[in-house]
Amino acid sequence: MRTTIALRLALLFMALVFVIWAASSIKKGGVTGMFASLGADVGDPNYIQICPKRIHSFSWPDGKRIEEADKGAEMEWRAYDSAAATPRGLNYLSLEKWLSAHCLTRGSAGPATAPTKVGRNIIVALTYTNGDKTELQTLESDPNTFVWNNRLIQAHDLRQGLDDLRTEAGWAPQPSTLPGPAGK
């Protein structure tokens, strides 16, 4: 009898934890956001997954980059700047939080209509752990529109996130790197 009561209490407690977690996820991004946060392909064009694989490095046209480095049994994010002689270690948890917040970006997206590589500015190049590379670009005609994997993306949070990423590394957003309102 006592085993049955303990089992029921354990199941009720687990159900309560699941409901609290689900409510929190739904509040942040709706039901789609909840499943997307679990890594599920939600098939919603309003969610853009810029991290289909683990990101290894971010590289900007001004020569600055942030890279994850193997430090023995641990990993470390480092900021590389051509002006500095040695790379600087960054707060690992802050970078992981950034990835969590911005890998799945909410915004409107569709197929890119801009000509390939014409009229675009490269904002940041992403390198994934498997060696794949991709570029996040803006249109010269509309610096608030991003181009990623041949999709046009309107995502203000992503622009702010890239500003925050550079700030985390101790760099200011530069007009040549982030054109438009955030870079002016």
Image (cartoon, helix red, strand yellow):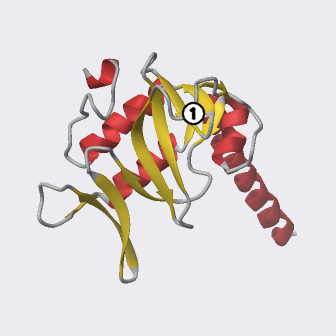
Closer-to-camera residue (101/65): 65
119 relative position to 62: left or right? right
- Dividing the picture into quarters, in which one does residue 85 lie? bottom left
From what the image shows, is residue 26 above or below residue 18? above
Quadrant of the drawing holding the N terminus: bottom right
Secondary structure beneath label 1: loop
User: Residue 115 at what x, y percent from top left?
Assistant: 58, 27
Res. 21 visible in picture: yes
User: Residue 10 at what x, y percent from top left?
Assistant: 74, 61
From what the image shows, is residue 90 above or below residue 180? below
Quadrant of the drawing holding the C terminus: top left
Furthest-bottom residue in this view: 72
Residue drawn 33% across and 56% down? 66
Residue drawn 51% across and 26% down? 155
Residue drawn 67% across and 50% down? 38
* Amino acid, disc 1: Thr
Res. 23 visible in picture: no
Query: In the rendered image, which residue does mark 1 sit on?
Result: 116
Local crowd size for mark 1, using a 10 Å CA cut-off: few (<14), some (14–19), many (≥20)? few
